[in-house]
Image (spheres, rainbow, N blue to C red):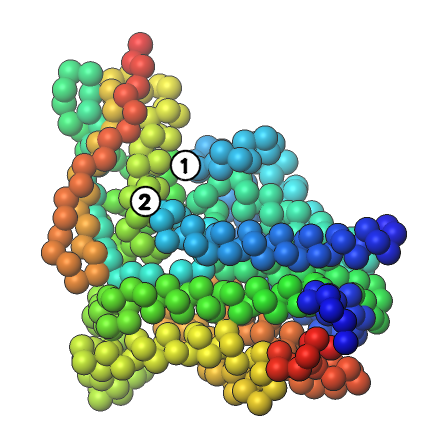
Amino acid sequence: MSRDPLAFLDATMPMRRLYWLRVPVGLIAAWYLIDVARHERDYRDHFHRPYRFFGWLPDLGPAAMATVMIAGAVAALAMVAGVYPRVTSKLTLAAVGYHLALSATNFHHNRAYLAIALFALAAARLDRDEGPAWPLWLLRVQCSVVYAASGVSKLVDPDWIGGTVTWLRVVHQEAQVRASILPGWAVDLFVDRDAHRLFAPGIVATELAIALGPWFRRTRPWALALAVVFHVLIELTSRVETFSYLAVSVIVLIWLDHPVLAGRHREPAVTEPGLH
Amino acid sequence: MSDTSSYAGRRVVFVGVLLLQAFFVVRAYWAPHNEFGFQMFPEASQWQAEVVRVTTDGRQVPIDESWSELVRGRGLAHPGHRQHANNGLASQLAFLEDAMAWVAGNTPDDRETLYYEATVTTWRNADPPEVTVLRSPTRQVP
């Protein structure tokens, strides 16, 4: 057993998980970059708020902006197709990173998560069957951070954990909820203030369970199933751009115990010494 | 890259990224826009603003469609409508203040507006409404 607590970063692992992850991540990145090229290429003529630290970034005119975004989208689609994935993953990350760094108005949680996933892909040996494990571990930790940060921020907010926030979100949209396909008893339940004293802690517990569950072999399948159900419900009830698709793709592909993804490699658990 | 440098390099990147991520998570508790803080669906707050141009002769002129042509997204195109503060009130008000400053600084043909002013009513979750006044920097009018 190694004394180096970070020795697991040097282990060689099959690259199948990240290799398959390039498909949904690449498609989502291409969708995002094409949308920017179509609707935001003239961003300089509209309100935007540049970051102080990124003032050195070039301000591109509409034609140049569209060209860079389309080039990024082409790289993303090439990554999906497995064409020079080590190069195309880096080009995709560069295009997404450039757009995010241009203005605070460009930032959304789903785009931040996309950049994180692209960073892991860009760092991985996607051109080989096996490679260093550290990009996968980095993405696993980051995946847990996303859910843990969200869950803890709700846990420490009395309005959130007490159900006020979720109740008001429903009440503000009561007309749409009543016009939806939901049966009357379900709508009555969703607009009931007291029900949200249970719903809200349930949501927080779910986020924390998704953050921690995958790290233990026994709870991993349950955590992955919970994550899928959780994101399906979010997708049905909220507008979160591509977040649900990205989040489900990432957590399933980096954690699911299946020979197609893991090969003969036995997934370590945090309860095992040395993690490998 | 030699074995030694890649050995050290991956540790530097791994630990560096996680430290940076930890910083962003903590920063999200005070920064208005909480990039990489992942505080999702943070509030059920709402806001509405009456935005006016204050002219050099003291008139208060409500903004018109030229505002929504310049300011798109983030719920800022039509601030007069009461609407959900998508990323929380702090983020919404910071963006509104920045938008007023941007419009004030990027409309050189406007030779009468001294500054923009917004009277913002906010409903933070179930709290009673609060009124805040925001103002853009004063313009140099020729």
**Label 1 SS:** loop
Image quadrant in which the C terminus of chain B is located: top left
Report the side of A209 relative to A37 (left or right): left
Q: Residue B38 in the image: state x and y as whole percent.
A: 45, 60
Inspect this view and state whether residue B45 appears.
yes
> Is residue B111 or residue A9 the one in the foreground?
A9
Amino acid carrying mark 1 in the image: Phe
Inspect this view and state whether residue A187 appears.
no
Q: Residue A58 in the image: state x and y as whole percent.
A: 60, 32
Residue ID at (58%, 83%) = A216
> Is residue A141 or residue A245 the one in the foreground?
A141
- Image position of B68 with respect to A134: above or below: above
Mark 1 closeness class: few <14, some 14–19, many ≥20 residues within 10 Å: many
- Quadrant hosting residue B52: top left
Report the side of B128 relative to B15 (left or right): left
Disc marking residue A47: 1
Whether label 2 touches label 1, CB < 8 Å: yes
Residue picked out by circle 2: B76
Chain bearing tag 2 is B
Q: Residue B131 in the image: state x and y as whole percent.
A: 14, 44
